[in-house]
Amino acid sequence: MRAMASTLALLVLSGMMPATAGAQTEIFETEQADFTLVTVAEGLDHPWSLAALPGGNFLVSERAGALRYVEQGTLRPEAVTGLPRVMNDNQGGLLGLALHPDFETTRWVYFAYSEGSSSANHTALGRGRLSEDGRALHEVETLFRVNIDKARGYHFGGRIVFQPDGTLVLTLGDGGLYRDEAQNLGNHLGSVVRLNDDGTVPFDNPYASARGAQPEIYTWGHRNVQGIAFNPQTGSLWAHEHGPRGGDEINILEPGRNYGWPAISYGINYDGTPVSDATHADGMEQPVWFWDPSIAPSAMAFYQGEEFPDWQGDLFIGALAGEHLVRFEIEGDRIISTEELLSGLGERIRDVAVAPDGHLYLLTDSRDGRMLRLDRVIP
């Protein structure tokens, strides 16, 4: 299976008044909805993840280690205080954000980050209570750490999502140089872990009582998982991961399942040699989609909202190397069509999120990164 994307038609309407302040004049015409892009905030240093707060404000993580606050469309100049020390090296830094399901009561903000040094580091999960004015995190604590240190700053995973039962899942990576460890249940590399909201291990985790396995592991055999979301049609948990040269995958995660890396793969190594001589193996799951060549998928979100009624239930995935946004039309747990959006934007898209206001928001990955909003154009 190979991703085949339709061409985006881009209409530039000179002299057209922007829909809102800061809007660009381009109208992006797609198969099911036309939209403009509005720059909500700019001047962000490699923004990685955003979290929509009640009332229309946002938190944004910067990979270098700062947590930023966007208040009514304006980026505060000062960072939110209270974070632990973050190791910023290559792909490592302050990564995914998520709010507690009862955030309005608890004020808990969860964040994934890299910890340690360039020669000995790992992914960690922390949380802190956001002050009412949004200027500080209090009662900050580390809930989870990957149980093995690795050299070099590669493949941290770092996306967080809460499940309907109140547990959370955190995506991880294989550490780059340690890919065979993704087939070792004795450590967390190359896995997705499931935790209670306080960091303890749920009693019904698939390996909670298994001898020699890490009890937090939910799924394993992954390379570097940087997108995860629930399908609103079925309640299934979807995730995507980076392949090497080709072989980026979308998977539907089932507890205890092995997703094959590096024993099976649709990609090849960066030097052109095979990762594996197999794409299938007994006891290992197949992706529902893969890309060849790679687009370097960055984040994913299923759309639910009133702004784009024709996109209800569609899946959106950002591309870093591909510098575009992919829309998948979903039927149940099947992909039935795909469309490539924003291919002319020339921006690495790092995060994709749907806010309570029904808009789709993006983060662009650069030293002068932007937070963008898609506004529907009504004929």
Image (spheres, rainbow, N blue to C red):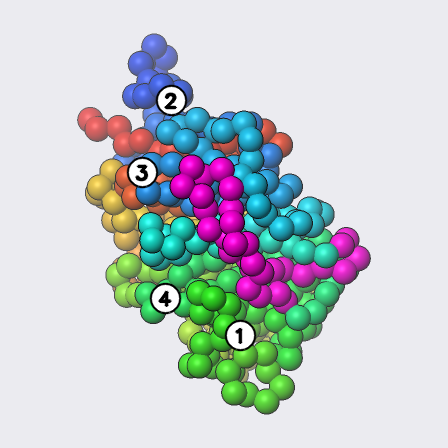
Residue 149 sits in quarter: bottom right
Mark 3 lies on a secondary structure that is loop
Identify which residue is drawn at 57% across, 72% down. 221
Q: Does residue 120 belong to the magenta stretch?
A: yes
The numbered mark, 2 or 3, whose residue comes first in the sequence reads 2
Disc nearest the viewer among 2 and 3: 3
Mark 2 lies on a secondary structure that is loop
Position of residue 19 in the picture relative to residue 243 (left or right): left
Kindly report the distance in space between the C-alpha atoms of the residues bearing marks 2 and 4.
Answer: 38 Å
The numbered mark, 2 or 1, whose residue comes first in the sequence reads 2
Circle 4: residue type: Gly
The numbered mark, 3 or 1, whose residue comes first in the sequence reads 3
The label on residue 55 is 3
Instruction: Quickly name the residue at label 4.
Output: 166
Q: Position of residue 292 (x, y in %)?
A: 54, 55
Q: Give the residues drawn in magenta, as a range.
A: 117-146
Kindly report the distance in space between the C-alpha atoms of the residues bearing marks 4 and 1.
Answer: 15 Å
Assess whether mark 1 and mark 3 are in contact (beta carbons under 8 angstroms): no
Q: Which residue is at the far top?
A: 15
Assess whether mark 1 and mark 4 are in contact (beta carbons under 8 angstroms): no
Instruction: Quickly name the residue at label 2.
Output: 23
Q: Does residue 87 belong to the magenta stretch?
A: no
* Residue 78 vs residue 369, the one in the foreground: 78
Mark 4 lies on a secondary structure that is loop
Residue 172 sits in quarter: bottom right
As drawn, 95 above or below 215: above
Q: Which residue is at the far bottom?
A: 211
Q: Position of residue 220 (x, y in %)?
A: 55, 73
Q: Position of residue 73 (x, y in %)?
A: 40, 28
Q: Position of residue 308 (x, y in %)?
A: 25, 40
Instruction: Quickly name the residue at label 1.
Output: 216
Kindly report the distance in space between the C-alpha atoms of the residues bearing marks 2 and 1.
Answer: 44 Å
